[in-house]
Amino acid sequence: MIAEIAQSNKIVVEKSTVPVRAAESIMHILHANQRPGIRYDILSNPEFLAEGTAIEDLVHADRVLIGGEETPEGHKAVEKLSWIYEHWIPKKNILTTNTWSSELSKLAANAFLAQRISSINSLSAVCEATGADVSEVARAVGLDSRIGAKFLQASVGFGGSCFQKDILNLVYICEGLNLPEVAAYWQQVIDMNEYQKSRFSQKIIESLFNTVSDKRISIFGFAFKKNTGDTRETPAITVCKTLLEEGAKLDIYDPKVEPEQIIDDLTHPCVTESPESVKKAVQIHSDPYSAVRGTHAIVLCTEWDEFVTLDYKRIYQSMMKPAYIFDGRKILDHERLQQIGFHVQTIGKRYQRTGLNRSWGSVPQL
C-alpha cells in the first residue's frame, strides 16, 4: 500500500518483531513495487509497552530503541525519528543501533523477563519438595543489587502475546543460524512455563483426593494478568482444560474478560474436541460471590486486586466443605484463610492437610 501511494521519499518505521529480519522483508517488498525515483529508509523501532500501562510506558519510557542501516541515508533517517521522540524523551534515553541489534534487543528483553519467571518457578518446585518458601527465597535473592526483585514472583506461569512469541522467534532464529544449543537453552524457558502450568493443575486434582469428576470448581480470573482483558496464552486456559478433561464443572469469574471470549478460548480446537460438552460444563458469572456458591474449590489464576479484598468468610459459608483455595498468584492472606477454615494450596510452599474428611457434599451455609 505504501509503494502504491507514495509520491516522495519515505521513512518506514517498523514496530513489530517477527522470526525474520522484518526491516529487510519490508524493504524487499517496497523495492519490488516502488515507483522510479522514490527512496525508502526502513527503521526498526520496537515498542516496549506493557498491557495496562501502555500510555505510561510511552510517556515515561526507560529507553527508546531505533535501528537503521549503517549508511549516510540510514543515519539521517534515524536522526529524523529521534527528533520526534526528543519532544518528550531525554536524548540520553534514545538508543540508536543497526537494524539487527534493534530487532534482537526486543526479543532479548522479553526473553530475559520470561527467563526470570521460569527460573523462580523452577525453584518453586524445589521449595515444595524441601519445605522452603519460594517467597522468602525470592526476597533473599532479589535483595542482591546485581539481581533485583522484579519478575521474581512465583506463579502458575506467564502468559500474554509477547513472551512466548518472542522467545519462539529467538529459538527460530537460532535454529536458522545453526546454533542448536542456544535454541535449546531458550526453548527451556517455554518448557518450564508449560511444566509449571501443568504442575499446578495436577496439584489441584491431587489435593481434591485425585478426582475432580463432577466437582464444581470456581475459577477466579481468566486474563493472563490483571488490568487487561487479554486472554492470549493465559495460564487459565491450561488449568481449565485440564480440569474439564478430568470431568470438573467450572464456574468462572473475571472482572474484565467478556464471557464470549472465555467460551471461545475453551472451545477452541486446540483446547477441546468436544466444544458442546465444554459449554455444558462451564458457567460464566458476573459476580465473584455467585461464582463460588456451592463449589468445592476456588482456583485463583489472575492477580486481580479485588480478589484480595473479597469477604472470604462469606465465601467460605457458601461453599461445599471441605472448602479449598488454590492460589496460583500468591496474593492472598493464606494464614487468614486457614483460620476461616479453608484448606489452602499455593505455589512454592508446602501446606499440610489436617483434619480432612473424605466425604464431600457438606451443605453450605446460605
Image (cartoon, rainbow, N blue to C red):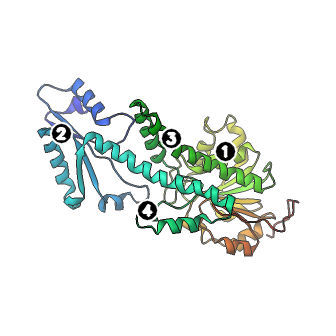
Circle 2 residue: 70
Q: Amino acid at mark 4?
A: Ile
Circle 3 residue: 187
Circle 4 residue: 147
Circle 1 residue: 241
Q: Quadrant of residue 363?
A: bottom right
Q: Residue at x 74, y 50 (%)?
A: 249
Of the two numbered discs 3 and 2 on the same chain, state the one appearing first in sequence.
2
Q: Residue at x 21, y 62 (%)?
A: 90
Q: Quadrant of residue 145?
A: bottom left
Evaluate if marks 4 and 3 touch, with contact meaning CB atoms under 8 Å apart. no
Of the two numbered discs 1 and 3 on the same chain, state the one appearing first in sequence.
3
Between tags 4 and 3, which lies in front? 4
Of the two numbered discs 2 and 4 on the same chain, state the one appearing first in sequence.
2
Q: Residue at x 43, y 32 (%)?
A: 175
Q: Position of residue 12 (x, y in %)?
A: 23, 39
- How far apart are the alpha carbons under marks 4 and 3? 22 Å
Q: Amino acid at mark 2?
A: Glu
Between tags 1 and 2, which lies in front? 2
Q: Nearer the viewer, residue 111 or 224?
A: 111
Between tags 1 and 3, which lies in front? 3
Classed neighbour count for the residue bearing mark 4: other residues with Cα under 10 Å, few (<14), some (14–19), many (≥20) = few
Between tags 1 and 4, which lies in front? 4
- How far apart are the alpha carbons under marks 3 and 2? 32 Å
Q: Quadrant of residue 244?
A: top right
Of the two numbered discs 1 and 2 on the same chain, state the one appearing first in sequence.
2
